Amino acid sequence: MILDARAPDDVDHELVALLHAWLPHRRWYPAKGSDARLSAAGAVHLTDDVRILLVQVDAAGRDVLLQVPLVLLAGSAPVGTDRASIVGEVGGRTVLDATGDARFLRAWLAAADGPGAEVDVTGARVVTGEQSNTSVVLPAPDGTPVGMLKVLRAVAAGENPDIDVPRRLVEAGWDGVPAPLAWSQARWPGPDGEPVVGYLGVLSAFVPGAQDGFELACGWAREGRAFSGPAAELGETVAGMHAALVRAFGADPDPAGGEALARALHERFAWAVDAVPSLADREPAVQAVAAQVAALPTTPARQRVHGDLHLGQVLRSAGRWFVIDFEGEPLAPLAARVLPDLALRDVAGLLRSFDYAAAVGGLSGAPAAAWTADARAALLAGYGVTDDPTSTLLLRALELDKTLYEAVYEARNRPTWAPIPEAGLDRLLG
Ligand SMILES: Nc1ncnc2c1ncn2[C@@H]1O[C@H](COP(=O)(O)OP(=O)(O)O)[C@@H](O)[C@H]1O
Ligand SMILES: O=P(O)(O)O[C@H]1O[C@H](CO)[C@@H](O[C@H]2O[C@H](CO)[C@@H](O)[C@H](O)[C@H]2O)[C@H](O)[C@H]1O
């Protein structure tokens, strides 16, 4: 079923006024630190007291349509309500963030497509953490977690790789991804007023006992324990994922050689300098890497990839790795995130993650270098990357590209972590 958004009413406009104060403190708010203009683009009325507000966020250089599910309660918030979920008050009604609310979840599941799952919405638990979206654990009636609902925060018209790709991977027979169980879509007026359809969220099979790969790696780094075993298995898992992506979506030969990649690196650099002007003095070194890449007569075929693979996107359960979050880089436009790309981009993303895990795990200097070197070698061996000059250069260029992205990401979201990509640039640019 496709849910239709209604034109915004007076209550929606009042709700947006309330959100001015609440949204900037949400981890998933995409325009932190900039002076954004918020407006109501429409609302899906799930029940009389639950609505999904679609909020247009216009910030310098960024237009995002945000999904904000809200409950409007008569009277004050019930005792025990998490303070962070209280948005404010409108017309004598208390406004709550609805993502973990049984009323919202019941209505969401009733409107969703897919095989579905039997869940007890009253036992829902919102996951807190470093997220671009909001995830909710849903238990079965016996209390065992059965599904993970991801409420997408930035919504966009068209296919969503975070739903489409896992579905296709499961169809291609790959079991390294949690299977999508239910997904929901809405229709709202697009920029030219014509209706467009996009995804609101997806419920995926819950991976029991899963450990976040980043937390796991940070823990091992903190203990000074070599990560080569899990890293090698992760390399094998990613190789299996890439093979399944080719089965599902095919692959295109690369007619442009290294020039296309070099151009993309220049563009990434210009984008990064625009956001973080202090990067400008890296230009000669970035250009030198781009020039080497441009001289490559051929590069490997392009295929669908994960696009933002890092240790926070992999889960370890019962000695196996699972890959999640196929949304691509949240700071990139959707059209760019679904283009075929070099499979090595995902490998480079994981290599970057080892730098983060070492730093967050408290390692620096020679112990950090030794820990990351060991994990890197194991990942590359597990994946099957050979150390020929072309692969080495491609990986360096792709790591550089990712590090520039991270410099912008950290400046916008976690400025205290900005030294991690900064050190990465020092390493990659010599
Ligand atoms: N299917 C799942 N089973 C168990 N835990 C999951 C599942 N999917 C996600 N998670 C947990 O939720 C967190 C956030 O999920 P993710 O898809 O990365 O969201 P986001 O796009 O907001 O970053 C993950 O780090 C992981 O700990
Ligand atoms: O998981 P998301 O899709 O929200 O990805 C974004 O946020 C990530 C951080 O949560 C960010 O990843 C960077 O930090 C990680 C540690 O927190 C590290 O493991 C990654 O290597 C590093 O890139 C990701 O870049 C961003 O798109």
Image: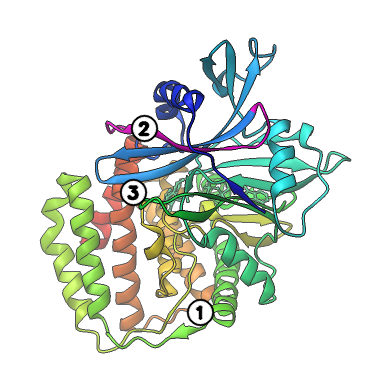
Mark 1 lies on a secondary structure that is: loop
**Residue type at numbered disc 3:** Gly
How many C-alpha atoms fall within 10 Å of the one at disc 2: few (<14), some, or many (≥20)?
A: many
- Residue holding disc 3: 365
Label of residue 22 in the image:
none
**Residue visible at 54% across and 13% down in the picture:** 91
Q: Is residue 34 magenta?
A: yes
**Residue type at numbered disc 2:** Leu
Residue 90 lies, in percent from the top left, at 52, 16
The span from disc 2 to disc 3 (Cα, nearest Å) is 45 Å
Mark 3 lies on a secondary structure that is: helix
Span shown in magenta: 33-49
Q: Does the magenta stretch include residue 317?
A: no
* Label located before the other in sequence (2 or 1): 2
**Residue visible at 63% across and 71% down in the picture:** 169
- Residue holding disc 1: 384
In the image, 306: left or right of 268? right
- Residue holding disc 2: 38
Decide: is 379 above or below 55: below
**Residue type at numbered disc 1:** Gly
In the image, 263: left or right of 58? left
How many C-alpha atoms fall within 10 Å of the one at disc 1: few (<14), some, or many (≥20)?
A: few
User: Which part of the image, by quadrant, shows the N terminus?
Assistant: bottom right
How many C-alpha atoms fall within 10 Å of the one at disc 3: few (<14), some, or many (≥20)?
A: few
